[in-house]
Image (cartoon, rainbow, N blue to C red):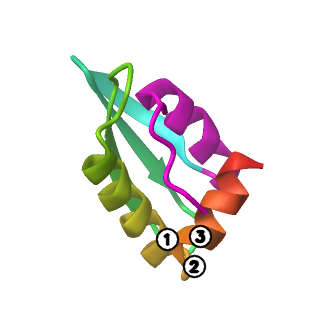
Amino acid sequence: MKMPRDLSGADLAKALKSLGYVITRQKSSHIRMTTQQNGEHHITIPDHDFIKVGTLAEILKDVAFHFDLTRDELLNLLMS
């Protein structure tokens, strides 16, 4: 699946809630999310209008690794 180019930080945070992530804090333009599924895991998302493709790729890689998924499997879960 092709990496989305117009995904905002708020949209990504909303999509990650389906995987059990909750917002634990927000400081300035960064959202910190945590999940307890498969062990505790934290990620930080920039709350920008559009997340840069490289930043988005690293966030998705980190989440996919935590849930033992490929990036494409994760994108299919989040974008459906």
Q: Earlier in the sequence, mark 1 or mark 2?
A: 1
Residue count near mark 3 (Cα–Cα under 10 Å), binned few <14, some 14–19, many ≥20: some
Local SS, label 2: loop
Disc 1 and disc 2 in contact, CB within 8 angstroms: yes
Residue 44: within the magenta? no
Local SS, label 3: helix
Residue under the image location 47 percent in, 34 percent down: 23
Residue positioned most to the right: 80
Q: Which numbered disc, 1 or 3, marks the residue closer to the eye?
A: 3
Displayed quadrant of residue 46: top left
- Closest to the observer, 16 or 20: 16
Compared across the picture, whether 21 is left or right of 54 comes to right
- Horizontal and vertical percent for residue 12? 51, 38
Q: Write down the residue under mark 2.
A: 69
Q: Write down the residue under mark 3.
A: 72
**What range is drawn magenta here?**
1-20
- Horizontal and vertical percent for residue 19? 65, 55
Q: Quadrant of the N terminus?
A: bottom right
Q: Amino acid at mark 2?
A: Leu
Where residue 5 is drawn, which disc sits there?
none
Displayed quadrant of residue 37: bottom right
- Horizontal and vertical percent for residue 24? 41, 35
Residue under the image location 42 percent in, 30 percent down: 9
Disc 1 and disc 3 in contact, CB within 8 angstroms: no
Compared across the picture, whether 30 is left or right of 41 comes to left
Compared across the picture, whether 53 is left or right of 73 comes to left
Q: Write down the residue under mark 1.
A: 64
Image height check: is 32 above or below 28? below
